[in-house]
Image (tube, helix red, strand yellow):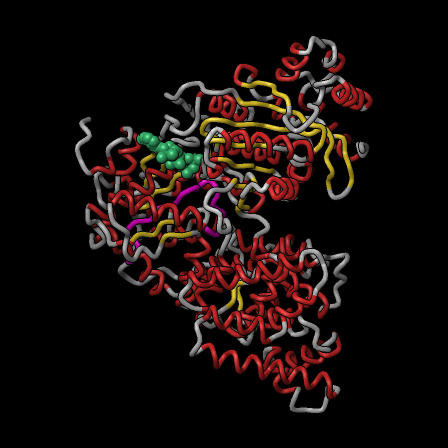
Amino acid sequence: RASVGPKYLTGLNPEQREAVETLDGPVLVLAGAGTGKTRVLTTRIAHILSQGRARPAEILSVTFTNKAAREMKHRLGQMLGHAVEGMPWLGTFHSIGGRILRFHAELAQLKSNFTVLDVDDQVRLLKQLLQAENIDDKRWPARMLAGLIDGWKNRGLMPSQVPSGEAAMFANGKGGKLYASYQERLKILNAADFGDLLLENIRIFREHPDILRQYQQRFKFILVDEYQDTNVAQYLWLRLLSQAPATTKPTTPTVIPGRAEGLNPESGDETSARDSGSAPSAHPGMTEHAAVAVATPHVKNICCVGDDDQSIYGWRGAEVDNILRFEHDFPGAKVIRLERNYRSTGHILAAASHLIAHNEGRLGKTLRTEDQDGEKVTVTGSWDSEEEARGIGEEIEQIQRQGEKLNEIAILVRASYQMREFEDRFVTLGLPYRVIGGPRFYERAEIRDALAYLRVINSPADDLAFERIVNVPKRGLGDATIQMLHDHARKRRIPLFEAARAVVETDELKPKARGSLRDVVAQFDRWRAQREVTAHTDLAQIVLDESGYTEMWQKDRSADAAGRLENLKELVRSMEEFENLQGFLEHISLVMDREGGAEDDAVSLMTLHSAKGLEFDNVFLPGWEEGLFPSQRTLDEQGRAGLEEERRLGHVGLTRARRRAMIYFATNRRIHGTWSTTIPSRFLDELPAANVEITESKGGSAWGGTGGYGASRFDDMEAFGSTYSTPGWQRAQANREGNRNRGGGRNGGGGRGGFEEEAATFSSSSSSGP
Ligand code: ATP
Ligand code: MG
């Protein structure tokens, strides 16, 4: 086919082009890593706009991270040759859901300036509820309840819909009731948690069909990236929005007791009736007025892209099933497969494909590259995690000396605690780096304190924020005072801040406490008044200074006080990007991924989970050890399914690399303070020998390099009676060193199954080492 048409279409292969140009009806692009799925989505938006099929505000495009949304916006500008004006509906499920909820906050018993709680706030709040109910927090930790509630919300379940069996899992059946009182508390605090952002949307859509219709009419095109990681709530939300608006009496609101029931009432059956009768070329989006559409809402133009082999959020409620049953849910869907990988070289792609082939539950797909084989994937052993970090640090410096950009280097870890070692190393080396996702700048204590001040200014009902800072810096407002405020607030059903205002007018408090509390109330009143006339950045600085918070850290003698003051400065600086305080706070609550500091060129450090969708020339994959990767917890909790999800995570990691993928494992690792002797990840064994090269660590003595470490490691393993079979890479290593017999003793015995059972024994009983 001649590639005539707009410039943005040139260079696409025929399948990609088909996915871009099939604008009408449901489309699923089911394809492997690096095949251009995200590019197809972006190009599709460009195509819709330049064909005049919709205005920017009529396109809903869901990305997995805020960063991905910004990236998409940027690319779109490049394709169209001009910045896109008013493309407001491009973002994560949370950010879009949050935005919709602000428009209709009153329907969820909230005010439009509601606060979005993070996990920490959530847990504090639940702790209070447990206390009030006299439930022992040690036996029934608030964190566990937070996890349960999150899980229910991810599945679209309101308190009344929690199956009794599951409610019974917490505090002898009180789970459901606690969930309900938690929701009530949130309303009183004018707050929502992340789960609410979508759940309240779904509730509003179902209870107010006119509002739903308004959005259905608005969004002419819906696009979803990383569809394999959508959870049930996200799926239900999409289903509701993706039906063409009904023009007659809306369907009665339906409860959503669970996934199976939740889907059906107004979807599957009716749409299949429509589709069986409609020609393939029907334009559902254009024929909304057609008689058939009046009675039967049908699916409109929705395009989802995803890869079942990259489903890595099962632990957070994602259902890979959503992608597997797309054709069933969106009948008449066109399914397009892309097979050419444009990202990675041959060896990397072969290694990644070989690894994932060990999974049973997959659709299976072909991936090919027309790129060269390139460099083999390297596997490097180190003595411990420090040596690993040193080795990777030196490797990075070498890459840098060759004139490559640090931006093209990423370190992808399995667990976020692995990051500290690298951070320390980079600070020592003076290597600029940024942490993406995970424990973020905004989660540092001083930043959270500063944000709490701003939150109380923004929303006086924000009790959690108020409680956090009412005695920071110390003002002589101890637990007894706080308790009294709580009692007052509960009795009169008012926020803590208002309780404080009332209490200082009485003589219930000792004069000193009363004096300082009165000062606090007066200060906040003053700052709120100032807010009207002062730029929000100036206001923030004023608040930090006048409250004594800055001074508190200036007087602090601990080693990190200076760093904290710098962070506070950075915080004020970062506010400049926002129009006002409200906008800034909203951003904070939604940020999933942190941008780097001032550095333009920096190494990226992140978890494998946050690396989804990204690509780098050089990718380091440290910590491929049993117990860490695959993670012991996942294996314990989810067994075989967990192992497969871990393997997909490995696949995601490898497929981030364009030119070089470098895997590391350490023989000793300190996990939560105790040293453990580790054994290499079973995933190393699953890599194809032909595409892998064993190398030595640059960070010091490589394991086995001098004989010593290697030998002791093997001795340790034999002591445990391992049935671990000698993997290809290990044989290669043995051959290279003329040490053929080292691995030999472990060849007899069981296969994978035997090993899996023993893995637990290893990690629990192998505390030894330096
Ligand atoms: P992932 O599954 O990891 O999210 P993906 O399928 O979304 O991957 P993209 O990120 O869209 O893949 O594309 C991978 C890389 O290949 C990008 O650098 C992209 O620009 C490039 N690419 C995609 N299609 C083409 C093409 N037709 N010609 C040249 N480069 C392409
Ligand atoms: Mg992508």
Location of residue 482 with respect to 223 vertically, above or below: below
Give percent across and percent down for residue 719: 82, 22
746 in the magenta segment: no
Range drawn in magenta: 218-236
- Where ligand 2 lies, by image quadrant? top left
Give percent across and percent down for residue 357: 52, 23
Give percent across and percent down for residue 591: 49, 55
Q: Is residue 635 visible?
A: no
| Residue shown at the point (74%, 9%) measured from the top left | 741
Quadrant into which the N terminus falls = top left
| Residue shown at the point (39%, 27%) measured from the top left | 341
707 and 58: which one is in front?
707
Give percent across and percent down for residue 251: 36, 59
In this figure, what is the number of numbered marks?
A: 0
226 in the magenta segment: yes
| Residue shown at the point (62%, 87%) measured from the top left | 502
657 and 552: which one is in front?
552
291 and 757: which one is in front?
757
* 134 relative position to 41: left or right: right
Q: Is residue 628 visible?
A: yes
Location of residue 495 with respect to 608 vertically, above or below: below
Quadrant into which the C terminus falls = top right
| Residue shown at the point (52%, 58%) measured from the top left | 194
Location of residue 749 with respect to 270 vertically, above or below: above
